[in-house]
Image (cartoon, grey):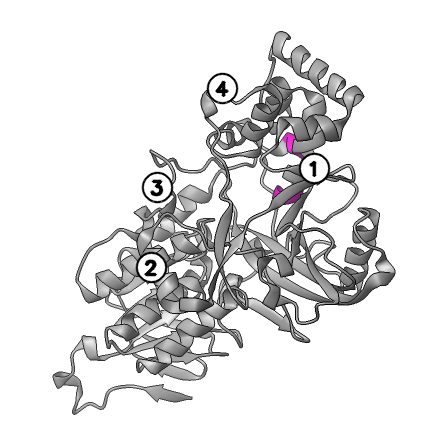
């Protein structure tokens, strides 16, 4: 094993500031930190376990076809994040039209729901049934409201609940709607949500309270990965380092500091550490330096996982939308992306369509454990079942699994995070940033904003509380911690995996 250390004769004369800042993870948060540090001339090393940068927001490239993992719109109310995006991408930052609809019962419904459109698509008979169901729900006693099914049915009627709420909610959260808390539904109805849109569509939008969704967004010409790859190039151009296939395997903690770390077979002595690794990974890498209670808290953190099956199809695009939500209970797919609608440069052959079928899963379940060939066959079969394309028109398919895609909020997550956070506060040169670094399901703009504040703490001596950074505060008048959705949280593979084994992920 090689080592990056200061010779003894130089140690007294070299300040901590001359040692590199180690940035753990090459996703949006890590690369933002590395980019800003390198711009200021600070020595910085970005360490990424995979063979490409971008993390959850990377762009996969297979046979020239590019696909995004989840659909990453570049839209923010944070001016400093928006300015940074434009600074990095320049003319490669395209302005793209936004279109996403709900696919239900073989029909496309506008999203947010449009009353005229819904009436036309439902038809007079089903519309009458839905209205009757709604009126009955409005006049009958509410009764118990312990779960999403009861809460929604009491307000919108059982028919609307079954049509538009049940299937998609169960796909996203991986549990029956009867196991999703009513309090979660009550919070979700605020602001811009499917529930509010549905109510406005059928029964009016009193006072114009429902805001329209954005009609366009920015997007890199060759997918979101182009943003992160450009950032990595700029870090190197400014004297920093970006190391791929360099998973962090140990954090050496002494006297309340990280004095060294091991990554890619090297020992590095950093001045500061900015980590976007999952909280459980950070605890695992610290080993015995983390008390038992902290390790136990980390072991209990849960994640919802995700996989994409990208299919290349002979013929025209299946729909003009960027993506569609699948509200069909008979299929496992939750969303379908149309990559050409994100950017024409994502699809190299104009005679082909390329779509991504997205499955919300738990690592270790039957879908996750299926082979790539089985998943391609599942996607082809479901595409035909939905009536969107014939299976024999699919020429090839590619599978990408995304572990730890969504930090899960359950009844105990906040307490567990607090235990870990209190321990981290004692490590004076470590800052956690990003979605998994803070165990918060937020977008790329939030991840980047936490990294910006972390860099200010390093370079300007500020004392920003990264746990209080919230990009959503610019969307809402007041910040509210998210309700956790689960009445009874599903077991996940991560609770059984050793913390250290999962650390490089």
Asked if 21 appears above or below 200 in the picture, the reply is below
Q: CA distance from mark 1 to mark 3?
A: 30 Å
Name the foreground residue: 142 vs 376. Answer: 376
Magenta region: which residues? 171-178
Nearer the observer, 54 or 484:
54
**Residue 133 placement, left or right of 430:** right
| Contact check, label 2 and label 4, Cβ < 8 Å | no
Residue at mark 4: 206
Q: Residue 421 at what x, y percent from top left?
A: 34, 51
Could you tell me how far apart the alpha carbons at marks 3 and 4 are, in whole angstroms?
25 Å
Query: For the residues carrying marks 2 and 3, which lies nearer the camera in this image?
Result: 2
Query: Which disc number belongs to residue 167?
Result: 1
Using the rendered view, name the quadrant where residue 200 is placed: top right
Compute the Cα span from label 2 to label 4: 36 Å
Q: Earlier in the sequence, mark 1 or mark 3?
A: 1
- Separation of marks 4 and 1 at Cα, in angstroms: 28 Å
Q: What residue is disc 2 on? A: 83
Q: Residue at x 37, y 60 (%)?
A: 290
Which quadrant of the figure has residue 102? top right
């Amino acid at each position: 094993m090689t080592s990056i250390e200061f010779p003894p004769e130089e140690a007294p004369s070299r300040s901590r500031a001359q040692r590199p800042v180690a940035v753990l993870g090459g996703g949006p948060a890590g690369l933002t930190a590395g980019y800003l540090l390198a711009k200021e001339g600070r020595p910085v090393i970005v360490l990424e376990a995979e063979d490409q940068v971008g993390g959850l927001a990377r762009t996969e490239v297979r046979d020239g076809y590019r696909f995004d993992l989840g659909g990453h719109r570049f839209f923010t109310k944070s001016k400093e994040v928006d300015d940074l995006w434009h600074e990095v991408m320049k003319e490669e930052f395209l302005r793209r039209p936004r279109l996403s609809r709900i696919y239900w019962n073989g029909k496309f419904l506008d999203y947010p729901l449009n009353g005229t459109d819904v009436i036309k698509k439902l038809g007079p008979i089903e519309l009458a049934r839905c209205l009757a169901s709604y009126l009955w729900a409005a006049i009958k006693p509410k009764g118990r409201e312990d779960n999403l099914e009861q809460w929604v049915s009491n307000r919108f009627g059982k028919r609307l609940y079954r049509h538009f709420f049940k299937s998609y909610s169960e796909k996203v959260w991986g549990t029956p709607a009867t196991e999703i808390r009513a309090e979660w539904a009550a919070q979700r109805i605020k602001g811009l949500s499917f529930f509010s849109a549905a109510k406005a569509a059928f029964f009016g939008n009193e006072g114009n309270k429902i805001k329209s969704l954005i009609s366009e967004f920015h997007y890199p010409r060759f997918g979101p990965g182009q943003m992160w790859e450009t950032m990595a190039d700029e870090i190197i151009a400014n004297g920093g380092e970006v190391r791929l296939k360099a998973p962090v395997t140990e954090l050496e903690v002494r006297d309340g500091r990280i004095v060294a770390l091991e990554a890619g077979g090297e020992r590095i002595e950093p001045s500061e550490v900015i980590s976007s690794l999952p909280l459980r990974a950070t605890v695992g890498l610290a080993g015995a330096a983390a008390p038992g209670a902290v390790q136990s808290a980390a072991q209990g953190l849960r994640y919802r996982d995700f996989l994409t099956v990208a299919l290349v199809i002979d013929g025209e695009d299946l729909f003009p939308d960027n993506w569609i939500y699948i509200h069909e209970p008979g299929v496992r797919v939750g969303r379908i992306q149309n990559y050409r609608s994100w950017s024409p440069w994502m699809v190299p052959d104009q005679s082909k369509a390329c779509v991504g079928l997205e499955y919300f899963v738990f690592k270790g379940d039957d879908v996750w454990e299926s082979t790539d060939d089985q998943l391609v066959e599942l996607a082809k079969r479901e595409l035909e079942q939905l009536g969107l394309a014939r299976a024999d028109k699919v020429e090839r398919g590619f599978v990408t699994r995304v572990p730890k895609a969504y930090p899960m909020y359950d009844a105990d997550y906040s307490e567990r995070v607090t235990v870990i956070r209190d321990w981290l506060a004692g490590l004076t040169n470590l800052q956690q940033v990003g979605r998994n670094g803070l165990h918060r399901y937020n977008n790329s703009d939030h991840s980047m904003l936490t990294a910006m504040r972390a860099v200010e703490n390093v370079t300007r001596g500020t004392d920003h509380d990264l746990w209080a950074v919230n990009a959503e505060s610019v969307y809402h008048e007041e910040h509210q911690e998210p309700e956790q959705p689960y009445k009874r949280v599903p077991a996940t593979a991560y609770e059984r995996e050793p913390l250290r084994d999962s650390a490089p992920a």
